[in-house]
Image (cartoon, helix red, strand yellow):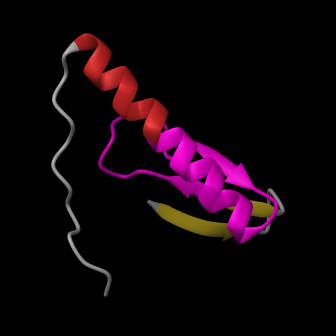
Amino acid sequence: MIIQWSDEDDCFLVGFPDFAGQRWRTHGDTYELAVANGIEALESLIIAYEAVGDPLPEPTVSSVC
């Protein structure tokens, strides 16, 4: 999960680079809200992949730098 401040949107944007599709999946006015929304969005992505039998993408980053 990547969380990045956007001056243009005036909020924190949340993305999952290993999942195909849109770059940003959700957002939050605070970092804490962005994290909570990101967790919810990730759970929804996993459910959607499992519902159609698609394998989850392999992570490209396995540790925090």
The segment highlighted magenta reads 13-42
The answer to whether any part of residue 21 appears in the image is no
Instruction: In the rendered view, tell whether residue 43 sits above or below residue 27.
Output: above
51 relative to 35, above or below: above
Q: Position of residue 52 (x, y in %)?
A: 26, 12
Q: In the image, is residue 21 part of the stretch drawn in magenta?
A: yes
The answer to whether residue 33 is visible is yes
Task: Tell me if residue 7 comes above or below residue 59 in the rendering.
Answer: below
Q: Position of residue 49 (x, y in %)?
A: 30, 24
- The residue drawn where x is 32% and y is 81% is 64
Pinpoint residue 28: horizontal percent, then vertical percent. 74, 56
Residue reaching furthest top? 52
Residue displayed at 33% across by 41% down: 19
Q: Residue at x 64, y 49 (%)?
A: 37
Q: Looking at the rendering, in which quadrant would you find the N terminus?
A: bottom left
* Residue 12 in the figure: left or right of residue 42: right
| Residue 40 placement: quadrant | top right
Which quadrant does the C terminus fall into? bottom left
Q: Tally the numbered discs.
A: 0
x and y percentages locating residue 15 in the rendered image? 50, 52
- Reply yes or no: does residue 26 show up in magenta: yes
